[in-house]
Image (spheres, rainbow, N blue to C red):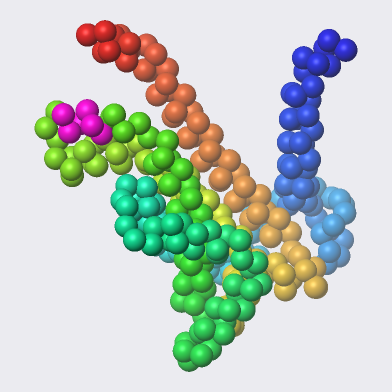
Amino acid sequence: MRWIRRNLLTVIAFVVLAYLFLPIAVVGALSFNKPPGKYNTKWNEFSLDAWTNLCGVPGVCESFGMSVRIALVSTIVATILGSMIAFALVRYRFRGRSSTNLLIFLPMATPEVVMGSSLLALFLNLKFPLGELTVIIAHIMFTISFVVVAVKARLQGLDPRLEEAARDLYADPRATFRYVTLPLVAPGIAGAALLGFALSFDDFIISFFNAGTLVTFPIYIWGAAQRGIPVQVNALATLVFLTALTIVLVAQFVGWRRRKALERSPITMDTLSRS
């Protein structure tokens, strides 16, 4: 019982992680499968055909590249606009600030079916042709809210004394923002950008309503599921997961090296405060 009380939280954490990563492991394992028919649902034979010929099935790489391009454009625009909105909401007091905070959460709380159909009605009333541009606009609209929330949380956790110290050292507002504020907020902005990219790349419902004849990667998978998803889809999905995992591990390693360098540095905050 003593061992259970001491390790219960660790065991629960491992069980939850195993539950979360088991579907990803199945997708990765099936990417090395050679199915006997159209449906890649049961293990048959080990093969590297999907990895050596990722574009062997027509439309797979085209839809994948389209989703990456849309996610990149919408992430860049949403990150810039969302960061500016977050700075305005945290650092300034203006009329309608509380209403703006409420409106920011509405796209996050609105069901995607409602948002997708509403945007479709808007584009049709404006006689706007459906395609890549409409999907990018739609993705920017719903990813901005997530960017604002992430950057806003980072800004609210900053110590204002750091910026005050920069101003005491005769730094102008631009220098303070460039050398103090921006480096401190950069992890929050980077995290918000990664979240926005994942949401945009993974979106199906809003894209399906506003894509017209455009085929993104999720739309391609939805259409291919009716006649058998090719093994290349599993390989591309595994490649995306490994890329995201590599980015997270590199960021964690860089942060660990930075913390170790600060610990080995002879100048610490305690010595600065005593001096």
Question: Residue at left 50%, top 31%?
Answer: 252
Question: Residue at left 47%, top 35%?
Answer: 251
Question: Vertical placement of 266 versus 133: above or below?
Answer: above
| Residue 15 shown left or right of residue 87 in the figure | right
Q: Quadrant of the C terminus?
A: top left
| Residue 35 shown left or right of residue 141 in the figure | right
Rendering quarter of residue 244: top right
In front: 256, or 11?
A: 11
Q: Is residue 167 magenta?
A: yes
Query: For the magenta stretch, what is the residue range?
Result: 163-168
Residue 213: x percent and y percent? 59, 83
| Residue 173 shown left or right of residue 186 in the figure | left
Q: Is residue 155 magenta?
A: no
Q: Main secondary structure of the magenta part?
A: helix
Determine the residue located farthest toward the left in the rendered image. Answer: 170
Residue 209: x percent and y percent? 62, 78
Q: Quadrant of the N terminus?
A: top right
